[in-house]
Image: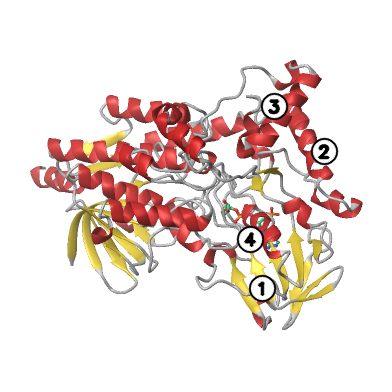
Amino acid sequence: MMQIETLIVGAGLAGLRALHALREAGIDAKVLEASDEIGGVWNHNRYPGARCDVESYDYSYSFSKELEQEWRWTERYPTQPEILRYINHVADRFDLRRDVVLNARVTEAFYDEAAAHWVVRTQDGQTWQTRFLMLCLGQLSAPKLPDYPGQSSFEGQVVVSAEWPKGGVDYAGKRVAIIGTGSSGMQMTPIIAPEAAHLTVFQRTANYSVPAANAPLTEEEDREVKANYAVRRALMRNSPTGLGFKPEKIATLDVPEAEREQAFERAYQRLGFGFALTYPDILLNAEANKVASAFLHRKIGERIKDPKTRDKLIPRTHHFGTRRPSVDSGYFEAFNRDNVTLADVKKFPILEFTETGIRTAEAYHEFDIIIFATGFDALTGSLLKPAIHGRRGTLLKDKWAQGPLTHLGVATADFPNLLIVAGPGSPSVLSNVMVSIEEQVDWFVALLAGMKSRGEVEIEATEQAEQDWTAHVQERALETLYMTADSFYNGGEVAGKPRVFMPYSGGIRSYRRLLETCAAEGYSGFALRKTPAAAQDAGVQQDA
Ligand code: NA7
């Protein structure tokens, strides 16, 4: 059995950052990674057009000024290959690989209550013993696939967007289907369309999108950003979602119409995802949202020539922003091509897959390649994949059967020394996740360093604290429009998944303050112990 002070699971942006920070603090750590390569979702999501919808300079680590200055991003929004190159550069630059174990998929973990440590097993038979188990498993990393009748009978090529083959897919001249119109489907559509013989996009729900306004980064821009990086980082940390800008402090409907139109236009042309922050109440007030949504309906409509296709592509069934919008580069225009068809599967559901294609209630389509861009079992999917057993053998999956329960999104009662990065109960998918990752990791490292110096061996969220926090996460969500739509934020789009709002919608700034207050109060809502609780209990019994 191998032993380590802290075991990190997942070698994506979070896991590598945690490894580096723990090392710097003198805490031994190793990372177990299921894949044969580092990079997390940026290793797996290799589909054509995969690109981050946060700007390059902001979707990068802030812990090293040298790294900030050395790395040269080439485009405003970074592509998947560029992010993967960046991650690999960081791993080399800080000599991280020597503590990353590849091809090590964690299948089980057991908490040894008497010893206050975790025993962790991997698929290939390794066993690790660790005091702290830190889960850096990502939010959108457990792919969710449909289960249509006859699905396995299709004899052509089946590809999952989040498991895109490293060697690529040869779709040139082929009849291609894309199922799903979230960011993955929307990003790959304009890249595949000009190459394929024919592309059919199967849409269940029309999705909002704002153009990426992507462009190469000039030397001048690069110099300017690097000269003022500290200011930029401070703006990010103090903005609601880590994107570096705040909405004007005025209610949407209080702004004269012409002025509002101009503000929307400016945001639409430049801010991408940040369009939602044009005014502070867009995600809070249905009337304000209606105005923003109507602006986008017009804009999307202008991009599509055929009136019937236009009608299907304009999202009208949910408030803008209540489901994750996309930031696209030519998605809607792709439907102006003769070789691209939109299949509305809400109106004409998919009935079955056959050996050669897909039959819907409207038509039969033959394909050479079918691509599933059907999203993820978000936020909890990756955390619940391994069988994680806490006190009394309790399975995390069972404990969270009615939805995730956490204190501050970082820990859950009955699972001492289990630390969760960017998971449910934290801003995670509602933020620039890089900011969330760095802040949480630094908070954890200070916690573990403090425990070490005080001789504490166990930390555990109290049940009261996690009940309070989980209720608070719901309350904050109910102040917004988020619960008016089924989405991967609330599990509503997965049959059988409890419909509870999972990320913390109060913003990264207030979240950071809560983390800071918690630490300043001696980790309020947590029990910190010098002797494991189980050993204390045993002691009491012996004394009696
Ligand atoms: P999303 O945003 O969850 O989108 C998934 C899409 O797949 C969405 O349009 C779904 O329709 C659709 N879907 C899911 N199941 C089905 C079935 N059974 N039939 C038809 N359509 C279906 O995931 P993405 O991967 O696009 O984006 C998430 C992020 O990860 C993003 O950053 C990417 O770059 C990578 P629905 O809307 O639920 O009706």
Compared to 286, does 318 lie above or below? Answer: below
Badge nearest the viewer, 4 or 1: 1
**Amino acid type of the residue that numbered disc 4 sits on in the rendered structure:** Thr
Q: Is residue 52 above or below residue 321?
A: below
Q: Is disc 4 surrounded by few (<14), some (14 to 19) or many (20+) residues within 10 Å?
A: many
Secondary structure under tag 4 reads loop
Amino acid at dot 2: Arg
Mark 2 or mark 3, which is nearer to you?
2
Residue 301 is labelled as none
Task: Give the quadrant of residue 297.
Answer: top right
Query: Label 3: how many residues lie within 10 Å, few (<14), some (14-19) or many (20+)?
Result: some
Measure the C-alpha gap from mark 1 to mark 3.
44 Å
Q: Is residue 506 above or below residue 382?
A: above
Q: Is residue 431 left or right of residue 271?
A: left
State the residue at coordinates (66%, 58%): 185
Q: Which residue is mark 3?
A: 285
Mark 3 and mark 4 residues within 8 Å of each other at the beta carbon: no
Dot label at residue 374: 4
Q: Which residue is mark 1?
A: 171
